[in-house]
Every structure is written in structure tokens, then in C-alpha cells.
Image (spheres, coloured by chain):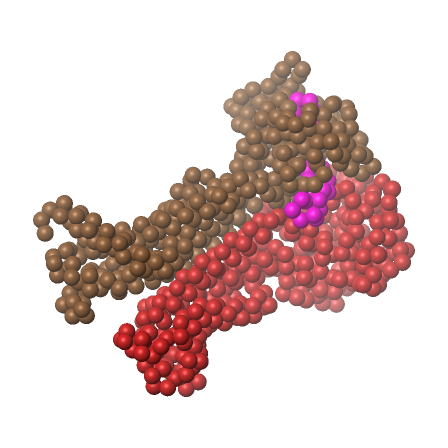
Amino acid sequence: MKFLHLIWSNLRRKKLRTSLTLLSIVVAFVLFGFLAAIQQALVGGVALAGADRLIVRDKVSIINLLPVSYEARMERIPGVDFATHQTWFGGIYQDPKNFFMQNPVEPEKFLKIHPEIILPPEQEKAWLATRTGAIVGRRTAERFGWKIGDKVPIRSTIWSQPDGSRIWTFDIVGIYDGKDKGTDTTPLFFRYDYFDEARQARARGLVGWYTIRVKDPSQAAEVAKRVDAEFENSPNETKTEPEGAFIQGWARQIGNIVFIVAAILGAVFFTILLVTGNTMAQAVRERTGELGVLKAIGFTNWQVVALVLAESCLLTVIGGVVGLGLACVATPVMAEKLEGLLPNFFFPTRDLFIGLALTIALGFVTGIFPALQAMRLRVADALRRM
Amino acid sequence: MAGPLNWFSQIGSITKFGLMSVPQRRGAVAATIFGIAGVVAVLVGVLSIAAGFQQALTVSGSPDGAIVLRSGADSEMVSGFGREETRVIADTPGIARTAQGPLASAELFVIINLPKRSTGTDANVPLRGVEPAALLVRDSLKIIEGRMFEWGKDEVIVGRGAAQEFAGLEVGSKIRVGRYEWPVVGLFTASGGVAESEIWTDAKILQDAYNRGDSFQSVSVRLNSPAAFQAFKDSLTSNPQLNVQVIRQSDYYAQQSETMTRLITTLGFLIATLMAVGAVFGALNTMYSAVAARTREIATLRALGFGGSAVVVSLLLESLLLALVGGAIGGGLAYFAFNNFHTSTMNFQSFSQVTFAFKVTPQLLARGIVWAAVIGLIGGLFPAIRAARLPIAAALREL
């Protein structure tokens, strides 16, 4: 640590160059933060999927509905703890741009199978007591300023009531939070019994998809096979897969665009590193003479290497920490702008640590070649260049 | 210091001098050029995704085409009509007619699961049931392999994009829809439009397979002229028998592409702006060190009588030139890497896959070059001013 002063003075020698380099590093790490947030938004759900949950949908198409009678049949299959269902409501609140999901569910089973949804017990009670009651996630509640007790009219693009009306009014009885930062708290959930009775008679008894809780997650694959076998050759054959695979499949529908964006950002990062590395190399070359002096007064080769590496690492760590910090501050602002487009847009803590590790790695990579060059320097040659 | 000609020749000689020293500073120069190339490649590349997606959706809509949906439905997926309603719609004045009848096709639109070739995971592939008029309503449709399906038979034709992106859609193979297996008998193109992402069959066949009775989801029509739209729309929306909305085909597709295009352009600009900022720092660094390395030369030139403004302009020129080289490399990279790259993504409005190709358009390339030039000018300006302000005597003393 006694050389810290020397390292610091070296960095301050060319203030302009140091600050420009520093700023490029800051930019690179802000970008890194955004990349992480984009990835999180598009594929982050996979990591949060319940290992004990299976999703059952119609084999031919996700838009085909399944009979509600399947629930009891599923629950008789060995290995199935219980099953419950959801249906895509396709509602619009005021303007199609205000997109968020609304699904009718069976409240008790729904809350049991989704422990990541945190609803205060008294609100749960209120939901069970109110047929037209709905619970909504914190984000959506805050976005539209909804409070408990509000009546919210939502126009369904799919479901109409017997009188032909498509406006459904729900009583907000609860506002839930997510257990993890990544839990999606945009959807609204309302009661299936109310939904089924209020929709047109010919559509009754049909639901969108099922979620099954298996007794033993390690048996999930076998249970999935049994479920599909149960409904084989029926008018509605099923496709059952673990929730993680289902979400991943969904993300992949958005496409390799994710991959392309990631690849492009990778290239960006690399380019900026190239610029930084070059500056660093230049800085060392300019000081050949001084390094010679250091060696002449008794610095060992390894001490010289350490000095140069410490300098480059200090630079990248400062730049990286500032950049990552800015990314932390800026992603919530971005998330506001992307509202509705990418719900889970945030900078995950795990990637923050990866980023920090990267700052040190970057300092090492950019510093190592100039450092080795400095090490190989012969004192006499170096001094002659002064 | 007489006359502009002299000034220009000064600029010329200083610039030449600067460029001749490039090989000595090749590391720094290369870093700047590639930094800027990276910015331009990313900008153009990301925006080419949005451009391609938008193009696929806009070529799909012809000015005299219109689509009729149930009122309140934002896509075909959630719309619905009975046979009677579609007849009333088809008989509305304003629709072009041939000897066979009005150019109106009542259609069904569903999605089926097919594995995506690139990932092997399920994708929602659109399956459309059409009536014979559909081929005249969308006249860009061409069979490029096999043949058209026969009306009333269990056969399908497949769009070229769908056949490329999803497995099991080659001519001669069979797709499974519930209890049925339908052979693929033909492959079609639609000038790169959305229809190329779809599988088509006879609407009647699809109604049976999906137990839809005699119902449809949308009616696509071709009007006498683009100007006939308003009258057509008014007569439909004022008809008490119907509860519909009428949209121009082009508006319908523009609306469908909006979410995705907005997402991509927002992210694209954000990323490119950040990168541009990074590249400006890189360019500044390079030019500052270029100036520092040439302190003595510049001072000598000034002592010989070269003007300060000539020094500024020539350094700016040098930086601009390097930036343009970077921009051209970046644009070229983007063009070769991304142009016509085929992919598919989700159309959020209809929940189904749209296949499309990235488009690196001349406008995008021009935009990339402009960005490069701006980066180069900003990166050159401050070092150039510093060079011009250099105290001559002090700089010469460094000799």
C-alpha cells in the first residue's frame, strides 16, 4: 500500500487522458448494466419458475381452451399434489397501451401454488368473501393509482357477458407484492367462479391452461408424461412441461433478437475495451525511462509488473464502479419509459457482482501486456531513452 | 497570409502531414477507427431489425385493401363473425367485383404449435383459413413450389418465411392439427409480407377442424379504389345489422408492428447513444495524443507563418477522415452481417409468430455515416483548438 501514492500520481500525470479513459470505461459498464437488465427482462422469469410446477396446455395451440373437468382428472393422477387453472382474459384498461395481464383464477388454490405472491391475510379473506373481488400487483396498482376499494372497469377483447357487454367491473380487494425482486407484480387476478357465471353460456366450463403442483419435483418429468397420457386421443390432447421450460419457450418466441442484442452489446464492450487497452499501453510506453530509473534504484521486476497492473486495475475499478452505480440508478428510470413493453426491466444483483469481477479482469487484461513489457525492460536501454 | 487560396493550401499541407504520420500512431488510430466502426455497426444493425420488421408489415398492406373486424377487437385473433354477417359485409358497395363475385374473403385465424428450427422449442405459428377471393384480395401471393391447395380438400400451403423458420413445413410433409393430418402441397411468397409467416388452407376445412361451425374472424376486402374507403367504412359502421370496425390494411399492419418497432428502436437508440459517447472519448484521446506527439511540428509550422485556423481545420479534417473510415467499415460490417438475416419474432397483438428479414436500408447507412462524422468532429474539435492555441515559443523550446 505504500506505493499507492506513486500509482495515484502516475494516473494524475495526464489528467485529461486519464479522465477520458475513465469515462469510456464508465460508459462500457453502464452498457453492461443495461445488457443485464434487458436479459433479465426477457429471460429472467426462467430462474424464478417453480421447480414443483407443471404447465398443462392444449397440444395443438395455446389459444384452444381445455374443459374445466380436467382438473379433477389431473388430481387423480399419481404424483400430482393438486391442479388449478387460469384463463387469458385479454382485457384493456382505458387504452390498449396500458397493457397488463388479467386472469380469472381459483383464489385459494392459486395462492397456494404461487407462494411468491404475498398477499396480507385480511386481504385474502376479503377476496374470498367478494365474488367480484380482484387482487392486483403493486406495480400496476401504483401505475394507475388504484387503491383497495376502487372499482375498476376493464373491457375484455375476448369475453362478453350474456347481454353482450364486454365491460367487466372488478372490486380491488387486495394489492400483492412479490417475494423476489423479479416476481412480476403487473397482473390482476380475479375469481373464476364469478367469471364463469358471468360469461356467455356457450363458453362456460372452458379454461386456458392448468398449473399442477407435483408432490416430488424430481418426479416432475414422469408426472408430465402421465398427464399427457391421460388425455391422449381425447378431443383436447395436452402438452405438459415444467414451468421453467414453458417460460423459456415463451421467451424464445420473442426470438433470437435477444441473442442478437446480446451479441451486439458484447461487441460494443469489446470495442470500448480495445480503446482503453490501447490508451493504457501508450501510457506505459511513455514512461519507459522512469520505469528504468525505478529498476535502477532497486525495484524488482515483479514489483514493476505489480505497479503497472495496479495502475490499470485502479483505473478500471474506479470507472467500473462509477459505471455500475450509474446503471443501478438509471435502470429504474428506463423501466418507466419501457413500461408495459418490458415488465421486469431491472439490474439484477448477481450481474452487479459479475460486473465488479469484470472491472478487475479488465484492468488485468489491459495492463498485463504493458506490464510485461516493462518487466523485460533492460535498465541500460531504458535509461538511454530518457 | 494573402487570400483564401493560400489558406486552403495551408490546410492541404498540414492535413497531408498529419495523415502521413498515421502509420507511426497506428495503434491509437486503429483503436479510434474500430471504436467508431463499432458504434455505426451497432446502430445500423439494431435499427435494421426494426426496419425489417416494419417493412414486412408495411408491404403487407395495399392502399385499396381493408380489413373488417368485430368492433372492439384489436386483432383478428379475438374478432368473430357469423356467416350472415360476412355476407352482408361482402355485399357492401365499394368492394371491387369480378365475374365470380365481390373480392371479399371471410377468414379464420388460429395458431398452432410448431417447433422453431433454431431452438427446437414451440412457437405459435399462424394458420389462416381463406375463401377463394383471398388470392385476388392479396394479389402479391405467388406459389413458388408445388401447387395451390384444392378447395374443400384437407391440404395446406405454407409461406416461405414459415417454412424457413419452423420445422416440418416442407412440401410433401404433413402437419398435425388435432385429430387431422394435412399434407403441405405448396410453398408461397407474398413479396416478403406477413402472409409469408402463415400457413393457409380452405376456411371450411379449418372451421370443421376447430368446431367453429359456420363462423369467421375477419373479412379482408379489396376496394374499387383507395378513395372508396371512407364510404365503405361509413356504410358498414352505420349498418344496424353489424357491429364492426373497418381498418385500412396498411393501418392495421402499422398498428400491429407498433409495439415491437417501438421496443427495438428505443433500445437501439439508447445503446447507440451510449456507445457514441464512449467513442467520442476514444476519438478525443487519439486526437489529443496526436496533437501532443506533433507539438513541435505544429509550433514550427506556426513559426513559419501558418495560420491558427488552418491548423484547426486540418486537424478537424484528419479526425473526420478517420471517423468516416470507421463509419464506412461499421456500415459495411452491419450490411454483411445483418442484411436479409432471416428470423422470426412474436407479434404481441396477435400472439403469433411473424417471420421477417433484417433490412440495412440506404437511409440507415446514411444515418450511420452521419453519426460517425459527428463523433469525428467532436473528437477532433477540442484537440484542434488546443493545438492552435499552443504558445509557439514554449513549444519550440521543447525541441
Inspect this view and state whether residue B234 appears: no
Q: Which chain is brown?
A: B
Residue drawn 37% across and 56% down? B30
- On the picture, is B387 further left or further right than A6? left
> Residue A52: x, y in percent?
78, 62
Front-lying residue, A35 or B349: A35
> Residue A225: x, y in percent?
84, 52
Is-magenta flag for residue B174? Answer: no
The quadrant in which residue A66 appears is top right
Q: Is the magenta stretch mostly helix, strand or loop?
A: strand
Inspect this view and state whether residue B46 appears: yes
> Residue B239: x, y in percent?
65, 26
Q: Residue furthest left?
A: B2
Q: Which residue lies furthest to the top in this view?
A: B99
Residue drawn 73% across and 42% down? B113
| Relative to B393, residue B190 above or below | above
Q: Colour of chain A?
A: red
> Residue B89: x, y in percent?
66, 24
Residue drawn 72% across and 42% down? B114
Residue drawn 46% across and 47% down? B333
**Viewport quadrant of the C terminus of chain A:** bottom left
Magenta residue span = B109-134
**Viewport quadrant of the N terminus of chain A:** bottom left
How many marks on residues? Answer: 0
- On the picture, is A305 further left or further right than A231? left
